[in-house]
Image: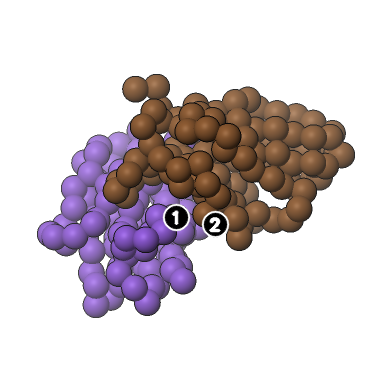
Chain colours: A brown, B purple
Amino acid sequence: DAGVIQSPRHEVTEMGQEVTLRCKPISGHNSLFWYRQTMMRGLELLIYFNNNVPIDDSGMPEDRFSAKMPNASFSTLKIQPSEPRDSAVYFCASNGRNQETQYFGPGTRLLVL
Amino acid sequence: AQSVTQLDSQVPVFEEAPVELRCNYSSSVSVYLFWYVQYPNQGLQLLLKYLSGSTLVKGINGFEAEFNKSQTSFHLRKPSVHISDTAEYFCAVSRFQGAQKLVFGQGTRLTINP
């Protein structure tokens, strides 16, 4: 199994630019989670999907952030416009139906200058 | 809502010494408990989990943890650490059934000195 795949692994952009992070969950998993990791706030859940439907987006910081899951094998997290305070590592995770364990991708390290 | 407190932000130990990383949680409902490890510049990897049953759970790499409901704790232990155990360790909880989102502690950085 390939595990959770995230791209890009690293992204450097300038303030104001649009950033799109991508995630491919483990095949057969029906829940997908986006987390953000920063020194100040640690690991925090941004949004999660169940069967491609957003269930809880209360962690999304503001309207500049949006996430989609058009099908069971792909999700995007978009930041538009990006700001320096968005610099963080963004993780995607997935788990299967009736499974408690979430499997994490390697993360995307984002730096907004 | 659930919350997790990891009592030590950093733990330095010598190689082959025992180690305990402490985790306390708060929840008004039953929870599942997890320990994840993050090696430098990598994602999170599951070490072990408590779902139900025996309160002592064993995980990978020789780690184990004990669930103590009365003290709302889930401390992680290893009897003899190795240099390769140097990493950041995260305790996390999720609600028993229902929403499966994880709530993480702030992490404990374990440093193994030769």
- Compared to residue B22, the image places residue A87 above or below, namely above
Residue to which mark 2 is pinned = A56
- Compared to residue A88, the image places residue B56 above or below, namely below
Q: Which residue corresponds to the image point at 37% horizontal and 77% vertical from the top-left?
A: B28
A37 sits to left or right of A3? right
Q: Which residue corresponds to the image point at 46% horizontal and 47% vertical from the top-left?
A: A50
Q: Indicate the quadrant where residue B14 lies.
A: top left
Q: Amino acid at mark 1?
A: Lys
Q: Mark 1 — on which chain does it sit?
A: B
- Compared to residue B44, the image places residue B21 above or below, namely below
Q: Amino acid at mark 2?
A: Asp
What SS does tag 1 mark? loop
Give A1 or B97, whichever is nearer the viewer: B97
Q: Quick one: label 1, few (<14), some, or many (20+) residues within 10 Å?
A: many
B33 sits to left or right of A85? left
* Residue A18 percent location from the top left of the image: 79, 35
Q: Quick one: label 2, few (<14), some, or many (20+) residues within 10 Å?
A: some
Give A2 or A53, whichever is nearer the viewer: A53
Residue to which mark 1 is pinned = B101
Q: Which residue corresponds to the image point at 28% horizontal and 75% vertical from the top-left?
A: B71
A68 sits to left or right of A13? left
The reply to whether dot 1 and dot 2 touch (C-beta < 8 Å) is yes
